[in-house]
Image (tube, rainbow, N blue to C red):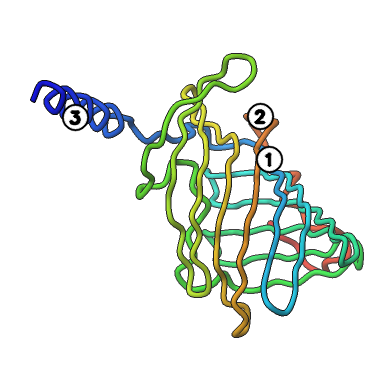
């Protein structure tokens, strides 16, 4: 009986510790961070593995976001893409830095700006220490789109709520083809800025102006 009681008390303590973890947010409005991902796509008709590095600029003051993405795959040529999303004006620029082409479109209806917080549906997993004795809380959550459902595990520093990395396990419908996705990702080089206007100036070959 004492053994059962001890187990019950231990379980209650674990539940209390987990549920007591507070979800956090990055407090800064202007910052950059670099994102790296190794992704594998697997289906009955094709397999694809690629590496991706994205330099991201987040401007929460004006609701706009810049991503300079380089994707490298054994199956395709090197891709270099610049994406600018403006949620206040509801449009997205996609710029091919190799072909020097620009395309502007409306953001999809219902599109939500990138979050700087631990998602509201996240469940606390545990605490780990990164090299340099950096304490990190790990969370897991589900992301759903009309074509994809993803199970995400991601770490956030206890001080500052900076994302550190994790895994994504997903299943996506690509034109009737069921694709399984596994990705490992990491974040680094977080930096707070005071002016990000230079990142939102369109290249000269875009035949338009952003500002």
The residue shown at (64%, 52%) is 183
Could you say which is closer to the camera, residue 193 or residue 97? 97
Can you tell which of label 3 and label 1 is closer to the viewer? 3
Query: Which element type, helix, strand or loop, lies under badge 2?
Result: strand
Position of residue 156 measured from the top left corner of the image (x, y, whole percent)? 51, 33
Label 2: which residue? 191
Q: Nearer the N terminus, badge 3 or badge 1?
A: 3
Identify the residue position indicated by label 3 in the image: 12
Rendered-image quadrant of the N terminus: top left
Point out which mark residue 174 bears: none
Identify the residue position indicated by label 1 in the image: 196
Residue 172 quadrant: bottom right
In 3D space, how far apart are the residues under numbered discs 3 and 1 (Cα atoms)? 47 Å
In percent of the image, x 75 and y 62: which residue is there? 209
Q: Position of residue 191 (x, y in %)?
A: 66, 29
Residue at the bottom extreme, as displayed = 176
Secondary structure of the residue carrying tag 1 is: loop
């Amino acid at each position: 009986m004492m053994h059962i009681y001890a187990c019950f008390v231990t379980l209650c303590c674990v539940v209390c510790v987990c549920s007591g973890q507070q979800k956090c947010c990055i407090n800064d409005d202007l910052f950059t961070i670099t994102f790296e991902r190794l992704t594998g796509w697997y289906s009955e008709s094709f397999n694809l593995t690629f590496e991706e590095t994205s330099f991201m600029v987040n401007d929460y003051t004006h609701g706009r976001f810049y991503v300079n993405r380089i994707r490298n795959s054994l199956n395709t040529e090197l891709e270099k893409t610049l994406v600018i999303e403006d949620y206040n004006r509801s449009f997205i620029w996609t710029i091919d830095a190799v072909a020097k082409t620009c395309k502007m479109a409306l953001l999809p209806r219902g599109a939500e700006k990138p979050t700087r917080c631990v998602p509201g549906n996240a469940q606390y997993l545990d605490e780990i220490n990164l090299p340099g004795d950096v304490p990190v809380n790990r969370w897991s959550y589900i992301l759903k789109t009309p074509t994809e459902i993803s199970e995400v595990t991601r770490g956030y520093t206890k001080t500052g709520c900076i994302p550190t990395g994790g895994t994504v396990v997903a299943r996506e419908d690509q034109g009737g083809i069921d694709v399984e996705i596994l990705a490992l990702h990491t974040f680094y080089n977080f930096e707070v800025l005071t002016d990000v206007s230079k990142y939102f100036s369109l290249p000269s070959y875009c035949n338009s102006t952003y500002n």
